[in-house]
Amino acid sequence: MPAPTGKPIIVGERGADLTADPSSGRYVLHDTDFRVETNDRYAVDGPRPLVRPHFSPREATVWVFGRSGEWLSRILKSGVATHDGSPLEVRRLVHGRGGRGDRARPNMNADAGERRFTLADLERLAWALYDMDLIDGLRLKYATEVLYAVARQYGVDRSKKE
């Protein structure tokens, strides 16, 4: 496969305040920075609302972590803890709903709807995977930079002083 020759969609230097510190509970991205999802087909089962953008595990695995589509699903089945040792909270759509419409997906857990991740969820997940030695520092850096670039597309830019 030939090497990519195009430039990234978004280029820019990260600001000094774009450094997460999970040990102190400080992250760059927060769900409160984004709009709440209003489409009924993405209704979540739980108290935390889903915000836009949000992604399935397969989508996140491929474009954030650069792995095969099932890699993250296998890890999630075994459980993922955040930096403080508490389990990572994964939002699920209302039972029987998948992001592709109101039909149930054949491989979906019978007791829960499809998992969905926000950018903030994926930032915390990346740090948790790093803590578990499932990704290295370079892949963590790549993943967080991708997430921050997408956040800028949605109007969230922490590198600018407010």
Image (cartoon, grey):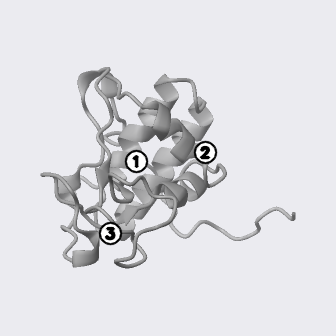
* 143 relative to 63, above or below: above
- Please, what secondary structure does the residue beneath circle 3 have? loop
Q: Amino acid at mark 2?
A: Trp
Q: Amino acid at mark 1?
A: Leu
- Please, what secondary structure does the residue beneath circle 2 have? helix
Q: Quadrant of residue 54?
A: bottom left
Crowding near the residue tagged with mark 1, few <14, some 14–19, many ≥20 C-alpha atoms within 10 Å = many
The Cα atoms of the two marked residues, 2 and 1, are separated by 14 Å
Determine whether label 2 and label 3 are within 8 Å by CB: no
* Residue toward you, 117 or 152: 117
Q: Nearer the viewer, mark 3 or mark 1?
A: 1
The location of residue 138, given as percent across then percent down, is: 61, 36
Q: Which mark is residue 122?
A: 1
Q: Nearer the viewer, mark 2 or mark 3?
A: 2
Task: Please report whichever mark, 3 or 1, sits nearer to the chain's N-terminal start.
Answer: 1
The location of residue 52, given as percent across then percent down, is: 29, 67
Q: Is residue 2 visible?
A: yes
Horizontally, residue 77 falls left or right of residue 152, namely: right
Q: Nearer the viewer, mark 2 or mark 1?
A: 2
* Residue toward you, 25 or 82: 82
Residue at 48% over, 54% down: 57
* Residue toward you, 13 or 81: 81
Q: Amino acid at mark 3?
A: Tyr
> In the picture, which quadrant includes the N terminus?
bottom right
The Cα atoms of the two marked residues, 3 and 1, are separated by 15 Å
Q: Which residue is mark 3?
A: 154
Q: Which residue is mark 2?
A: 71
* 32 relative to 127, above or below: below
The Cα atoms of the two marked residues, 2 and 3, are separated by 27 Å
